[in-house]
Amino acid sequence: MIKNIFLSFTIYFLFTQINAQPLPVLNSSEIKLALKKLNVVGSVLYIAAHPDDENTAVLSYLASEKKLRTGYLSITRGDGGQNLIGNEKDELLGIIRTEELLSARRVDGAEQFFTRAVDFGYSKSPEEALELWGKEKILSDVVWIIRNFKPDVIITRFPPDGGGHGHHTASAQLALEAFNIAGDSTKFPDQLKYVEPWQPKRIFWNAWIRSENELTDDLIKINVGEYNQLLGKSYSEISAESRTMHKSQGFGSSGRRDEVINHFKLLAGIPVTKDLFEDIDLTWNRIENSEKISELLSEAEKNFNPENPSAIIPVLLEAYNEMENHKKNFWIKKKKKELLEVIRSASGLWIEAIAENYFYSPGSKINITTGIVNRSDFPFELKKINITHLKNDSLYNSPLIKGKMLSKNFSINLPEDIDLSQPYWLREEKNNFIYNIIDQELIGKPKEAPVLTALFTLSSTYGDLTFETPVFYRWTDPVEGEKYRPVEIVPDVTINIQSKINLFTSEDERKIFFTVKNNTDSFEGKIKINYSGNWAINPEEIPLSFTKQNEEKQFSFTIIPPEHPAETDFTIEVHNANKLFSREMISISYPHIQTGTYFPPAKGKLIKLNTEKTEGTIGYIQGSGDDIPVYLQQLGYVVDNLSDAQIENGLLQYDAIITGVRAFNTRERLSFLYKKLLNYVYNGGTLIIQYNTIDLVTNEFAPYPFKISRNRVTDEQSPVNFLLPEHRLLNYPNKITEKDFEGWVQERGLYFADEIAPEYDKIISMNDKGEAPLDGSLIYATYGKGVFIYTSLSFFRQLPAGVIGAYRLFINLISAGNHNG
């Protein structure tokens, strides 16, 4: 018999961190799997360095075969990598990769975590990575996440003594050290205000086995290619779907449908012989006096009818009541959330709160339509609704009729001091290579909770239940159908500058164009520009007036540069009464991720260059995406972005042709069209090939042989040696000196040329500390009447960063074929 008792609890709808839309109701197979997971009490944490490092097959296997609470801790957000789907770099790329990880987790069933570490690009040693990050700070983050997540087992993707990328090895070293100290109350004691020490049982390396000769008796073997009858897929198939979410990395994957063996090597902890979780009790037995909970959950699973899921709700409610009667316990808290999600799905409840727009400014009025529908025979009554910033609950006591949506409308006023919807790790300026996060409890989370939520309290004979859902904006896309995005808080006005880097090669004046958007009802103010140095800017201020929301206006300041080379940062500000607005609004939108919005300062740079000879027409062949054509146009070049058809139809009209980064990795037609490019060179053209990785669509893009290696120089301050100081590339039209290599960002270059044919001139050499000099970052050869250049210098990072020397050198490359100089 089910006791007729008053039961009050809150169902948190599990939207908060990772969902771009309201969670769908689980189907019967998914409910069955969720019921099985309710009787498994255990967890595992997988740790690696970057987005895309995780083994998604292992995550899927652990989450749905072993039915464990499974997490992935990525030490960084991947903001130092490259982007194959757009031009976003640095913090914008970090936003994309954060969302890609969350999309992947929605597929494989794991949870996502991060530390404060910034991905600063390739690192050649773990010592460098840990020094730049600040080892103790990142170690404290790993310990913090372990103490919060409480894993029974930890798995690393990389060995702690491995070579290769320093971030990879550092991630394993951090994991191993954190494993050893997370249970020690004398380590990072300030955390104990929020969490308790926690000691996992053991830690493994997810070992790479390349041949049978590497197999040893101490390795644990798991087939992650097993098939899940309830999901209708193998874990390796699910893994491919998850990994394909890493689209900015170009990691689209095909599923495997056979045996996929993974091996695990114990790094520390209690030894095992057959299973990662040997001697770890993964049942309710690990919680004192929980026998009744286990019995009820087993009864619910046994009696589950896929054609009538709601029939088990009374048993589930009694199990929940048993959980309520227990003293506070970590696993009770987690299992209550899981159980409540099963109750929601078993009753077919759909709950929503929809706003009229997706953005609002502080102090705005928001109209919200809420809706709830019960699609089961279990009797519920809507008791009350509350929404963030709504002063009082709205009481109803309205029965929920099966299959009928019950809607209510609300208007709320946002506080004037409400925070903007800024990614929390980007609110403050980062401290070199670590994000500056003030709130300890935010560390580790992928994102903050939604800014607005709606609470629906339902009553039944078993008591009150409160469901929570974020407030969304909903629309219908003509191609993709129903779409959602969370409501965001934005500044009253935002400023978007057309070009952040503004280059001047003469004393001629130029305009800086920018757009101001009104995000509130009406607005009056004035626009100013702040700068330093001997620049003349007109006018001093511009009046601004808006009468309606979403209105946009374009403005400009006229800039007259100084006579001599100079540079200055500038900011654009909008003043209104006692308020100052000086932020851009950047929206990042791709179909596979939740739309993200970022509000960086509205600032840029003015640069007067000491250079000559910047006339000419350039054909640019885009690769994975870079902004170099924009800056070449500012220098005075005419730039055409070339399609495959334009390459096919002839190229002799161009003074130079430049391929964008990774063009020979991403443009399939170049496997045929490279002959056109070489003919162009032979007949007198200048061809500049920027860096490519080793996975080329053709190896025959150069007139003489060389190989693309994995060699790189990661220290952006490493000395540069001029091997041929009198070479044209170092002297015309700009005399290149050591000063031109000052102020470079993130790296010198990557994927250097190697095994270089004698026909090439090797112009410069460089190396990271303790390594031999590399001479493949810039090579030059004549071919027929023309010039061929391959460069792995990271111009794609330096030009957007305003590195003057990089501009001067790039101009020389473009001018290499002009032999009249």
Image (cartoon, rainbow, N blue to C red):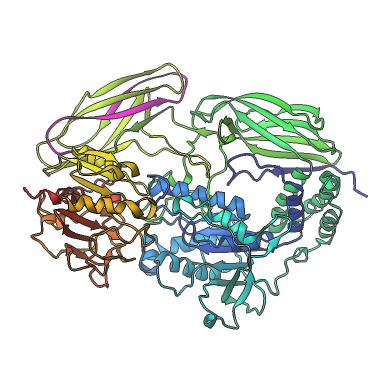
Name the residue: 84% across, 48% down.
312
Residue at 76%, 65% (x, y): give it. 283
Determine if residue 390 is in view. Answer: yes
- Asked if the stretch drawn in magenta spans residue 418, the answer is no
Q: Residue furthest right?
A: 1
Left or right, 397 with respect to 696, comes to right
- Does residue 185 sit above or below 747 in this rendering? below
Does residue 83 lie above or below 507 as drawn? below
Q: Residue at x 21, y 66 (%)?
A: 775
Q: Nearer the viewer, residue 28 or 655?
A: 655
Q: Residue furthest top?
A: 547
Q: Which range is magenta? A: 504-528
Q: Residue at the location (78% across, 66% down)?
A: 285
Is 318 left or right of 366, judged from the image as shown? right
Q: Quadrant of residue 703?
A: bottom left
Q: Is residue 402 left or right of residue 215?
A: right
Q: Main secondary structure of the magenta part?
A: strand
Q: Position of residue 558 (x, y in %)?
A: 21, 27
Is any part of residue 82 visible from this angle? no
Q: Position of residue 601 (x, y in %)?
A: 36, 38
Residue 527 is inside the magenta segment: yes
x and y percentages locating residue 440 in the rendered image: 51, 52
Q: Position of residue 513 (x, y in %)?
A: 28, 29
Classify 195 as above or below 100: below
Callout count: 0
